[in-house]
Amino acid sequence: MKCNAERIVKMLREKIPKFQCRPGCHDCCGPHPWSKWEWEQVPVAMHKQATRLDSTCPYVSDKGCEVYEYRPIICRLYGASENLPCPYGCGPDN
């Protein structure tokens, strides 16, 4: 049986609508909280310490999010939630 956190995170991920972000944008990236289960899904070789002096996520690079497929729920909600709107109007069609 899967752990409760895994089941909840996977269910929430399925409900968040997908959409295209503006290429090269990382304006919504910041130091966001991760659940323990989400963090454990990131391959250990990809783990980084938050060493940046600005307020962006340590996984932001010139090419975008380095852990995009593992990103936490809060990152997935940007632009998909009216409470976390994209500053450039990107978001799901409905």
Image (tube, rainbow, N blue to C red):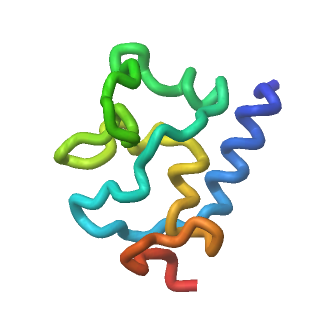
Q: Residue most toward the left?
A: 62
Vertical order, 5 against 60 (above or below): above
Give the percent coordinates (x, y) of residue 72: 55, 41
Which quadrant of the figure has residue 24? bottom left
Give coordinates of residue 32: x percent, y percent: 54, 40
Q: Position of residue 11 (x, y in %)?
A: 72, 50
Residue 80, located in which quarter of the rendered image? bottom right
The structure residue drawn at horizontal position 42% and vertical position 80%, both measured from the top left corner, is 89
For image coordinates 52% across by 61% down, the residue present is: 78
- Tell me residue 23's x, y (percent): 23, 64
**63 left or right of 25 in image:** left
**In the image, 70: left or right of 39?**
left
Give me the residue at 61% from left, 62% from top. Answer: 16
Which residue does the image show at 33% across and 44% down from the upper left?
A: 65
Q: Is residue 72 above or below residue 14?
A: above
Please identify the quadrant where the C terminus is shown.
Answer: bottom right
Q: Name the residue at the top extreme.
A: 44
Callout count: 0
**73 vs 87: above or below:** above
Give the quarter of the figure containing the N terminus: top right
**Position of 64 compared to 71: left or right?**
left
In the rendered image, the residue lying farthest to the bottom is 94
